Amino acid sequence: MTSSTAIPRAGQLECICEPGALDDTAADDRGTVPLAAGFALSVLAQVLTLSILPLAGSALAPSRGLTTLPYTAFYIGAALASLPASLLLDSFGRRAAFSLGASLGAAGGLVLVWALVSMHFNALVLGAFWLGIAGGFSLFYRHAAVPVGGKGAGAVLIVFGAATLASLTAPTISSMAESLASPWAFAGMAAAAALAHVASLFATASLPYRRIRERVTDAKGLRGWRSILLPTALGAMGWLTMTALMGATPMAVIGCAPSEAVVGAVAWHVMAMYAPSLLLAFFPRLALPAPLSASGCLLLAAGAAAFKLSGSVAGFSAAAALVGSGWSLTMLGTTLWTHQGSPVSRWLLGLHDAALLSGAILGTLAAGLFA
């Protein structure tokens, strides 16, 4: 005798999820706020970290040639994390992947605190590397926000734009943290970066369940690497320009102003990196991949020229804002470009981000040319 209904047996796992829990579209809608909060907190940690590393590296490096090593180590960690982060999103989902990245960032922030208190250069490099790994994971927030099928840019713009809050709060947080951690220079900012990653962990842990996207078994269902070659090249160029100039900015600003001005200049840069996304969220139809990418490249070139011509804090801050805006539009354009049309495999997405961050690493090595 047979029955159309399967009979439960010992050891069998039954789904007791509420109706609609496995629906990707519903999960995307409910997950936008936690994704935006997690990304904003992660960016706050990056603002504080990247304000520290060039100056701390200059103070603690045993030789002049190693000054930029902590700054470079951050982006090496981010590049190495990009492919594992991509694959973990498929294997374990957004909640597990982003929580792991935030945990590594919190640990890296604590290592950075110890390095600054004990004046230990090797520990500074290690802490920067771990924080970079967290940064590599957080870069995938923008991919996770793309709706199934890549239709629409609203969620991507909201998640990106939320990081504007990081630039608004970073100067105040850094000032308070430094006063509490006195007399250990930069230790307070490192501790604040660690706490920002802890808060990001709480945000990502609240993400609703999202069904792991179905793997396309037919190779014809996925776009090949040639379809993302141009946006990958443009994105890598944007990262190279941005990291080269922002690696040189703290050293340039500190030459004509107190250290507090460094965080202010970096904050203006970060605001410009994410504010365009917030504005475009109100006009999503204007978020067209190719025009955004082209506009971003023009702004990056203008920012590089402004930096070379600057000689004051205001000038360097303006150059940083131009570079931030250019990076923002380039990243938005290339991200939407990558997801346009049929899907791309997680392997290609991971390699795409690894290529972008390889450009960032080259930029850190070129930072001395601008300083």
Image (cartoon, rainbow, N blue to C red):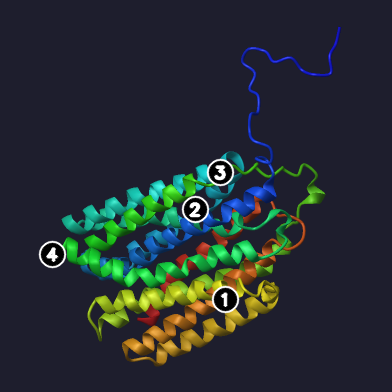
Is residue 281 shown above or below 42? below
For the residues bearing labels 1 and 4, Cβ distance under 8 angstroms: no
- Residue linked to disc 4: 183
Q: Nearer the viewer, residue 226 or 208?
A: 208
Residue 371 x %, y %: 35, 81
Please rate how many residues cluster around mark 1, counting C-alpha atoms within 10 Å: few if below 14, some from 14 to 19, many from 20: few
> Which amino acid does the dot numbered 2 rest on?
Phe
Q: Quadrant of residue 354?
A: bottom right
Mark 1 or 2: in front is 1
Q: Is residue 367 visible?
A: no
Q: Secondary structure at mark 4?
A: loop
Please rate how many residues cluster around mark 3, counting C-alpha atoms within 10 Å: few if below 14, some from 14 to 19, many from 20: some
For the residues bearing labels 1 and 3, Cβ distance under 8 angstroms: no
Q: CA distance from mark 1 to mark 4?
A: 40 Å
In the figure, is residue 124 to the left or right of 366? left
> Which amino acid does the dot numbered 4 rest on?
Pro
For the residues bearing labels 3 and 4, Cβ distance under 8 angstroms: no
Q: State which tag comes first along the sequence, 2 or 4.
A: 2
- Residue linked to disc 2: 137
Residue 320 x %, y %: 42, 81
Q: State which tag comes first along the sequence, 3 or 2.
A: 3
Q: CA distance from mark 1 to mark 2?
A: 25 Å
Q: Residue at x 58, y 69 (%)?
A: 331
- Residue linked to disc 1: 279
Q: State which tag comes first along the sequence, 1 or 2.
A: 2
Residue 149 x %, y %: 73, 55
- Residue linked to disc 3: 88
